[in-house]
Image: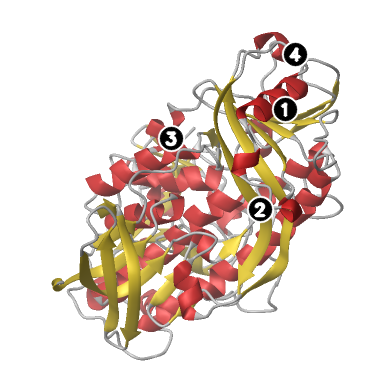
Amino acid sequence: MREAEHVPVLIVGGSVSGLSAAAFLARQGVACRLVERRGRPAWHPRMSDVGPRSMELFRSLGIEERLRALDEGRESVIIRVDRLAGREIERLSMGGPEEYGGLTPTGQVWCDQDQLEPVLRARAEELGADIRFGVELVGFTQDEAGVRAVLRDTAGGGEHTVTASYLVACDGAQSPVRERLGITCDGPGVLSHQAGILFRADLSSALRGRSFVLCLVDDLVDSATGDRLNILLERNLGRWTLSVPCDAARGEGAADFTRERCVDLVRRAVGQDDLSVEVLGTDVWPMRALLAERYRSGRVFLVGDAAKVLPPTGGFGGNSCIEDAHNLAWKLAAALDGTASPGLLDSYEAERRPVAQLLLRESVARAGLFLAGAAQGGSRQPGDGPSKAGVVLGYRYNSGALIPDPGPADPAPVEDPRRPSGRPGTRAPHVVVERHGRTLSTIDLFGPGFVLLTGSRGTAWQRAAAEVAGDLGVDLTAYRVTPPRPSASAGGAAGDAVLLDVEDRWPGAYGVGDGGAVLVRPDGFIAWRRPAEEDRPGDALRDALVRLLRPSGAPSTAGGPPRTLTVTADASATAPAAS
């Protein structure tokens, strides 16, 4: 066995969660290694809805356009039919511009998982992450000093040991890491067993010019099960998936879905008995809803499907994996480089587990409608629940790395993103701003460090930011936002304005006045705010950052040099234009 190597963060699992974690950590300047026991990426498309929040995060990684180029332009709708070539019964929106328009500088992209993962891997490696497929985790131990992991090359069988400060488990719904830690899961459990038939066929005559994300087929009832959950999904690269019930009670598996059976099911769903069908493969899986009791054990963190398993209804599962990884990455970076105390890492579970509870509830509600054959199962929450945009862009953190406003707490898990409050714990809203004629979004300002946004009379806040950031070694960028037509009373002539609030929305969206300030975390969530001027802005800002980054009250013990200080009055010259 080779002598142990050391990496700051070891990531186990090379699907969306792990590759996202590697890319976000590398962007934060954290050396990380990802190991994946498979020799190559998964072949099945699986996830295809890359939602607007995920796209905001990928925009910050610089891969927005790479992913958008893969979108083949399918319409964000669900249809319900008796057969695809037959009668259309129902049609509903599944997001798109009417759902998210004006809320974000980007938008959802339809990109299959087997297309997304290579882009993520390439970007992670460009940023310096060490990605190794064909390497599996054999076992690990941990103590106060770190994690000791034994790895095996799956091709040659040789073993070696790696030590790490932290281990991030992105090893999927069955998560061997979670099992070894003794962390249990609870929830509704298995809702259905499905077989996903991946195929190619010319469906042009049955489509009749229509485009959709998925299609519920009423007349297709498999004689082996009698169930009605039959979904036709449009994929990229000329591919389709027909998802049909699988009889787990009889031990039915992929081998039972012979080519002949698959072709017959596809022909019946389409309504063309002579359709030529190329079957590419069948993936049998349980539709489950489960949530881990804990997201952390010592120096080991659960991310993505290792932490919770959601039904695909609503499209929340894969996107929440990306958001988990993003939330954890900046906190690990701060703990490793000495900016924060290890206590900051407790906020990962405090923030992300309640969001998972929300998503589990929403996904199960939609799954119930899907199982009953109702198209709205994938589109909107039945009853009085939040809108799709509310769930995707309006979820809130009510505890964690944030300092609530004074006064009564609002425990609601979601706010309407069309009426943003600017409260700590909410996603910092998209507002269009301008710098020397260049248009961008406030979203483009966030990450990898903290951002302080001040009102037009906020020069004192900017001076305070420079002083406090230098003292604490915090990566902090300060911007002053002025009205569309700033006056001399706003702190300078129009030419001196830092960011021009093009639509005069910033004060309302962020809940501050001309002399106020808002502190935004590296993940784009509001950490703290002061609606008006402070007599001692430096003291207020210093207190906020210390409370956020050193919640235990103890100094950091992570070691390492302080992070780079950046205090500027300019927007990034490389920020993409808002849309």
Q: Earlier in the sequence, mark 3 or mark 2?
A: 3
Residue type marked 3: Gln
Residue type marked 1: Leu
For mark 1, what is the residue?
265
Side (left or right) of 69 relative to 77: left
Point 34% across, 41% down: residue? 62
Badge nearest the viewer, 2 or 1: 1
For mark 3, what is the residue?
115
Of all residues shown, which one is farthest toward the left? 3
For mark 4, what is the residue?
272
Of residue 456 and residue 441, the one placed in the foreground of this image is 441
Q: How far is the residue under mark 1 from the one under mark 4?
A: 11 Å
Q: Earlier in the sequence, mark 3 or mark 1?
A: 3
Side (left or right) of 304 relative to 244: left
Q: Earlier in the sequence, mark 4 or mark 2?
A: 4
Q: Is residue 201 above or below residue 10?
A: above
Q: Secondary structure at mark 1?
A: helix
Q: How far is the residue under mark 2 from the one under mark 1?
A: 19 Å
CB within 8 Å, label 3 to label 4: no
Badge nearest the viewer, 3 or 4: 4
- Using a 10 Å C-alpha cutoff, classify the residue at mark 3 as few (fewer than 14 neighbours), some (14 to 19) or many (20 or more): many
Of residue 140 and residue 535, the one placed in the foreground of this image is 140
Q: How far is the residue under mark 4 from the one under mark 2?
A: 29 Å
- Using a 10 Å C-alpha cutoff, classify the residue at mark 4 as few (fewer than 14 neighbours), some (14 to 19) or many (20 or more): some
Q: Secondary structure at mark 2?
A: strand
For mark 2, what is the residue?
286
* Residue 19 placement (x, y as % from top left): 37, 51
Q: Secondary structure at mark 4?
A: loop
Residue type marked 4: Gln
